[in-house]
Image (cartoon, rainbow, N blue to C red):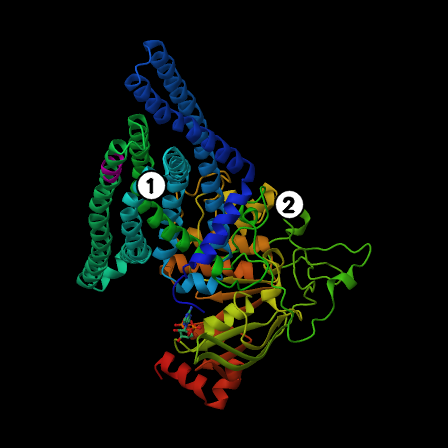
Amino acid sequence: MIGTLPVADPRTVARAARRLLAADRRTVTVMVVLNVLAALAGLGGPWLFGRIVDAVTGGSGTATVDRLALAVLACAVVQTLLSRSALRLGHRFGERTAARIREGFLERSLNLPAAVVERVPTGDLVARGTTDVDAVATTLRNVLPEMFVAIVRMVLITVAVVVLSPPLGAAGLLGFTGIWFVTRWYLCRAREAYLREGEANSAMADELAATTAGARTIEAFGLRARRLAAGHAAIAETNRTRLATLRLRSVFFPLVEFSYVAPIVVVLLAGGALYFAGSVTLGTVAAALLYLRQMVGPLDTIMLWIEQLQSSSASFARAEGLATVPPDRTTPVRAADHAPPGRAAARTAPGRVSDRTASGRVADHAPPRQAADRTTPGRTADHVTPGRAADHALPGRVADRAAPGRVAEGGTTGWVPDGDLIEVRGVRFVYEPGRDVLLDVDLTVRPGERLAVVGLSGAGKSTLGRLIAGLDRPHTGSVTVGGVPPADLPPDELRRHVVLVTQEHHIFRESLRDNLIVAAPDDVLRRALRTVGADWADDLDADLGENPPDGARAQQLALARVVLADPHTVILDEATALLDPTAARDAERALAAVLHDRTVIAIAHRLQTAHDADRVAVMEGGRIIELGSHDELLRACGPYASLWASWHGT
Ligand SMILES: Nc1ncnc2c1ncn2[C@@H]1O[C@H](COP(=O)(O)OP(=O)(O)OP(=O)(O)O)[C@@H](O)[C@H]1O
């Protein structure tokens, strides 16, 4: 488990950059060729100008000078045309590559293990997906093509000046060595400085997001001063890191300016001496000087953008860092899996169920049967398959799924659950090394049973719920649903078996239909909405991004998703805790309709839920310390009896 998102190391970044170049190999090749041709055309000008100087000093006629001047013009025109084409191609390449990076980032974000997403600061992920990806996109679109042109020109100008006159070329290059030292000094410090600036930006975004999201809590608990102090600290850190990069720039750029003049002075002095010694013509000195002047253009471009390149390479490292997070399930989910129903099947499961695909990891116990062996001819699976109206038998759980013979689509283990039995055996789980959150947990939940899990805050109830819902894997022991580890099931399959409903109900900025996640005919969707009492939801095309439903309605939507997914087991983790009492009563009614005929594991804070359950599991310090019916546990006079007594005030 990790507390912050990682940053890719330089080798990983270089590999990713190579992959992006290789993805557009043809364009890159054409770009290189056009740039080389443009740079070659550009070399003609100074050389011809040198010939003009020699022609004039040698007393040639104006006709020669005119011809040479026309050739200079032709070179300039050809260079402009070729450069423009190369640049246009470069911009297009940049756009396409930026789109690839965005898609990759989206895919990786969706693939992040739920436990990681919950633990890392939201601001970090948001800043990487916005500021960092935008910085990389801008660089690819605007900076990289120009840098590329500049580098090609610099290389060819260097070759040209050395070929023109080796001693003058050597003098010029000697003059340019200062830039190399200055740039090296800058680059050694810039990456770290920009990475720190990016981190500080993320932290500030996180602080602001936390303050905005928790506005009501802040008001209610008088936390304004605390939040302000946290905000100021984050802003101060951002300022500090920005000043650090500014300091680097304020040393770097003046030194670069000075370094431009140095080679010209050196060549003028050396050229003068060589001319008077009769080793070079005046035209050659003039051409060499012009070449060196020409060098300033591409150098300027490189120096101008080098800062942007540094900051965006740090941004790229942050965006690529997501790729280094180990997945909780090994088969990555495709971005297409997250398109709304109708476009692609799965997006986000009801409640906080993550849409990740299954891992190739084989369970440490033997699943009942292998899917491949179980394809029974003529047997039809009765699952809630997107688009299959017949499967949506509402409101209770009527569909007969997990039928032997059905092959799990997209599953990596090839196993499919056989039956609805939930078994937890010898489970141990940690979020942070050295701190067991679950220890030796054994539990069997029979199909159709209502189990309440109670215990003090931090006892491990939600973690147990997450393991049964397949969002996390146990570190030791096994959790199985119908004999198969739920974390091994692909999202589509998983949600037909187990769904976790929490108090968080995410609403996508899409239509009501898309928000229901499971694709089904309109009448089935409407029936699901009616089942949960969502009378307000008659227009399936209504854009929920424009009119986001309030807490109670969002809850109804989440429950409608459960109805449509039609799982045999629903895990409720404080599903109605955030609703006001009236809304909570309505939600309880809707819940009752949804839970009918299903196995229910209710993580309960109100002991009334435990009272109404078939059995109660009492958790403490990551262990189940008592298990039995309400009456049995009361008779046992143990921890549950004490909890019940204190809850009742007796
Ligand atoms: N993502 C996480 N990263 C690190 N520690 C975590 C994470 N989630 C929970 N914990 C810790 O694990 C322990 C068990 O948490 P869990 O949420 O499972 O308990 P709980 O009984 O459901 O508590 P509550 O009733 O307060 O929700 C707690 O100490 C909690 O701080």
Q: Position of residue 8 (x, y in %)?
A: 43, 58
Q: Is mark 1 within 8 Å of ligand 1?
A: no
Q: Secondary structure at mark 2?
A: loop
Q: CA distance from mark 1 to mark 2?
A: 55 Å
Q: Is residue 180 left or right of residue 118?
A: left
Is residue 505 visible in this depiction of the protein? no
Residue furthest to the right: 377
Judge depth for marks 1 and 2 and give the one in front: 1
Q: Is residue 297 above or below residue 510?
A: above
Name the one closer to the observer, 484 or 449.
484
Residue furthest to the left: 225
Q: Is residue 455 left or right of residue 370?
A: left
Residue located beneath label 1 in the image: 302
| Circle 2 crowding by C-alpha within 10 Å: few under 14, some 14–19, many from 20 | some
**Span of residues in magenta:** 266-271
Quadrant of residue 124 in the image?
bottom left
Residue located beneath label 2 in the image: 387
Q: Is residue 284 above or below residue 325?
A: above
Q: Position of residue 329 (x, y in %)?
A: 56, 63
Q: Is residue 124 above or below residue 344?
A: below
Q: Quadrant of the C terminus?
A: bottom left
Q: Position of residue 556 (x, y in %)?
A: 47, 53
Dot 1 amino acid type: Ile
Main secondary structure along the magenta-highlighted residues:
helix
